[in-house]
Each structure stands twice: as C-alpha cells, then as structure tokens.
Image (spheres, helix red, strand yellow):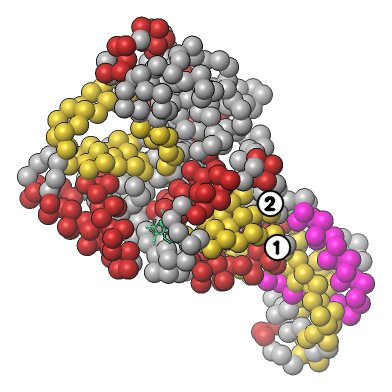
Amino acid sequence: MQDGGEVLFLDGVGEVVVSIGRSGLSLQPLHPPKLDSKIKFSDVYAVELLDKGLICGPWNTRTAIQGKKNIEMHRFVVHGITRTRKRPSPWVHCEYIFGHKDLKTCKNWFERLMACINNEGDRPKNLMVFVHPLCGKGRGVKNWEIVAPLFDRAKIKTKVIVTNRAGHAYDTLVSLSDIELKALDGVVAVGGDGLYNEILNGILSSRYKASYPPTPEGFGYFGSNENCEEQTRNGLNCSMPTPDSANTMFPGNSTKCDDHEPLLSTSQPTGLEIPSLNSSKEPCIGDLGIIPSGSTDAIVLSTIGERDPVSSALLIILGRRMLLDIAQVVRWKSSPTAEVLPTVRYAASSAGYGFYGEVIRESENYRWMGPARYDFSGTVVFLKHRSYEAKVAFLETPNTNPLTASAEDDVTGAQPLQSCQRRPRKIICRTNCFVCKEASTSGQNSEGEVADSSRTICENPKWVWSKGRFLSVGAAVISCRNERAPDGLVADAHLSDGFLHLLLIRDCPLPLYLWRTMADPLVRLMHGES
Ligand SMILES: Nc1ncnc2c1ncn2[C@@H]1O[C@H](COP(=O)(O)OP(=O)(O)OP(=O)(O)O)[C@@H](O)[C@H]1O
C-alpha cells in the first residue's frame, strides 16, 4: 500500500488511488478525467469478495484499460445507495467493483471495509418480515422477492411470514415472548398501511403501558368520582393531557383511581415499564419498517416521500430511522362500574368515524378492485349522505402557534408550502425537520430520558366542545399523503411534533360537501387509513 492510499482498478474508471478516511473511501483516478470522488460508509450496505474476473476500463470498453489489454483480476465489490436523477428520485443500489492482481490485497481491503461498515450506526441484523400477499394489487410477494436479495447481501437475517388472513401478523407478534421480541432488531411490513398498523398493534397492545388520554371535563363518567375529578383539575394526573399520549409514558404511581373509574385501573399499571418509542435510549420494542406494497401507502408517502420498495428496503438496511407520532385510540367501557377495561388501539396515520370510517369499511368488500375500491366506495358512501350526532371534545393547545411561527424563520429541514387557498403559510415536514426536532428535544431531560412533553408543549390545555351532526369526525397524526391528494389530509402535519390534527366535517347539503371536497384537499377523505 502506498502512502495515503493504494492503486486499485475500478470497474469503468481504470486505475485509482483508494484511501480510507474517517467517513468513507476516497478515490483519485490516475488518468483523465481525474475526478476525485468519495464513497461514504454511511451509504455502503454491503461489501463482497467476488470470483476472479474481468474489470472494464474507462468508457466501458471491454477490451482495454488505459490502452492495456484487460486481464483477469481478483475482485471485491462495494454496494452502496445513491439517488437517481429522476424526479421524484428514489434511492437505488449502486456498486463499485475493484480489482487487483493479488488476492491477498483484495481480501485485506474486504476485511478493512467490512470493519468500517460494521462500525456504522445501528443497523439491523435480525428482522421479522410480514408479507401481505393480497395487498395493493397482490404485489406483496413480488415486492419482497425484489428486495430480499438486498437483505441477503447485507447479511441481515430475515424470518419471513406470508400472512394468510387479517390478524395473522397481530397474533404472531402478541404471542412472541419479550425475549423473542428483544432478539429482533425490528419488524418489517411488506404491505400497506393496514398491515403496518396491525404490526404496530401486535407489538404494543400487550406490552406498551401508556396512560389513557385525558377524559374531558364534564364528560358523563366523570361525575361519579370526585377523587378522579379533582386529580384531573389539578393537572390531570389520572391521565395526562398530552399531545403525544401514545408516545409518552409517565413514570411512577400516577393514580389512585380504581377500576370504577373510566380512566385508569390498578390492574393496568401506568409505570414506565418499557422505554418509550420516543426514547433515544435502546428501544426494546425495536423498529418498525415498511416496504410499500399497498393501495395507498400514505405512511411511506408522508415519511420518505417515495412509493418505491427498493428505496424503503435500502433505507431499512442502512438503519435510517425517523421518529413517528402514534395515536392511541381508546374506546371506553360502557359504564363506569363495568369491570372491563377499555379497548385500546394504536394508529400510525389516522382514525375516523362517519364518512371516513365508512369508506374504509365499505372498501373492504371490493378489495378485488385494487386501489379503485376507494373511489367506488367513496362515491357510494357519499351518495348515502349519512350524518351522525356527535359531541366532540378536544384540548386546545394555546401555544401551538409560537412553535409554528418560530419554525417559519428557520429554513433548514422544513419549507413553506405555496398555498393558493388563503390559509396560513404551511411548514412542510421533511428530513431533519426542525419543528419535530424541537418538539422531541423539548420532551427530553438532561439524562436523555423522555419527560412529559405535554408540560412543555401545552401548558394550560383547555377543553373545547363541538356538538351537532357531523358527516365525519377524524384525526390524523401525519399528513396522510397519497397519489390522489398529494398534500394529504393535513398538509402541514409533522411526523413527530406530538400533535393530533382533528378533522371535523359538519353535516351540510350534498352539493356544498362536494364543492368543499373538490376545493380543499383537507377534506379529500377518500384515501387514507382507518
Ligand atoms: N392474507 C391476508 N388476507 C386478507 N387480509 C389480510 C391478509 N394479511 C393482512 N390482511 C389485512 O388486510 C388489511 C389491508 O392490508 P394492507 O394495508 O397491507 O393493504 P392495502 O389495504 O392494499 O393497502 P393500503 O392500506 O395502503 O390501502 C390489513 O389491515 C391486514 O390486517
């Protein structure tokens, strides 16, 4: 090896001086065009030794390298990822094949590079993969076959389960012991948002002990218990008013309520038994990945922005993570004295009643139509024009605006959407979004543990009531973008700012509803997740 590097042959380029730096490989061609380049270790997902073979010279001539005849060489290959020039630009696999006449030199490079990429971040080694064979237009298995070789190449062990019914993934995950679950670095859904939500619930339902959302003041059940009522007035100790109640848990014995109260039961502990998903310390729940294969893929379109299985697989392999808010949906028991605990579900995208919920339910009868089932069911439900009597209570967050306003001054990570609809300027959530960063760091104390972010984000929450007939009552934690509504249900929703966006559509004449639906992407409710 020369001082500062070694001369190797690079396929398609010719002789290059290759040296290992702190963050990557640098390549300096010995012959024109002498364009230096770098391969970052963070973008390398595998290195392999290849059999002896030909290395192509520059301009892809298969006959000579810098005038010399091609000779067979020992080779190794570095597999990385890069963005395509296409718009939208998915991540694609790229490879650099290096050659040298000496096998020992290649082996030495291979070992050094393996050591470098093994030092890179926290990459998964052992994954459980659920493949939904009927999702989208039956693309699940095909998509898995496309991306599975990438996982093999990266030496990631995968236990693949092709689902045979709804609930298969949920039951499998619920039945895993905590030790079995901890042995996994994550669970991957090859399917749509429904499968992702099923996996989320399978992991959380029996393991995640979060406080229930706060019960509104004046809510029927409350009158029956003064103790609980008082606790609620004094800072809602029974169940904290938190904008990210599903992501945040509260240590300690926070309540004295017993099973007669709707909020918490002593049989349902509220302590911090497993780390929050929001914790920067090792989450023992592991990570959840999704390889988009569904009909709408709103989660993927709202997070990485590409509906491309290969991009998602490569990002999972490289251990690229992002924090996501999760909504906790609690269906209270029928009466305050009932012994049964409320039903709890978790939602990664949105939840809805009325029009929205009906479209999703109705569409299940027409799964054979593929994605078109949402248009069909949407039209059917729209024409039925059902409305529902409802009383909706929500916590007002008085200092939401300052957070958004300060966000507008900063241009890193988020960009204003040019709105033509006379709404306030939107801050669109993107990679390294500073709004989400601000929200997540304000919820951590100096030891890096998750604190009660409700205290920092909404100090004096106030209950607001809305009563009447509604066509739809829905809520979204993320923007829920999809191909029909590129801005999603909530264009400026953030992935991890801890807020739930309430979407209330009051009963109105059909033509007005139609006009509003056409005019405003916020109420394009035909696509998304229930
Ligand atoms: N083998 C199966 N047969 C029938 N239903 C299944 C099966 N496996 C999973 N499911 C259920 O199908 C539902 C929808 O699946 P999924 O979200 O993967 O596809 P999709 O509906 O086509 O996509 P999207 O949610 O993006 O519209 C899930 O809620 C899941 O519980």
In the image, the segment drawn in magenta is 95-118
Viewer-closest of 40 and 133 = 133
Q: Amino acid at mark 1?
A: Ala
* Residue highlighted by disc 2: 123
Q: Disc 2 to disc 1, how far (Cα)?
A: 10 Å
Does 193 sit left or right of 515 as displayed? Answer: right
| Numbered label attached to residue 154 | 1
Q: Would residue 99 be counted in the magenta stretch?
A: yes
Which SS class for mark 2?
loop
Place residue 55 in its image quadrant.
bottom right
Does 216 sit left or right of 139 as displayed? Answer: left
How many tags in the picture? Answer: 2
Question: Principal SS element in the magenta part?
Answer: helix
Q: Would residue 256 be counted in the magenta stretch?
A: no
Marks 2 and 1: CB-CB under 8 Å?
A: yes
Q: Position of residue 226 (x, y in %)?
A: 36, 6
Q: Position of residue 70 (x, y in %)?
A: 80, 89
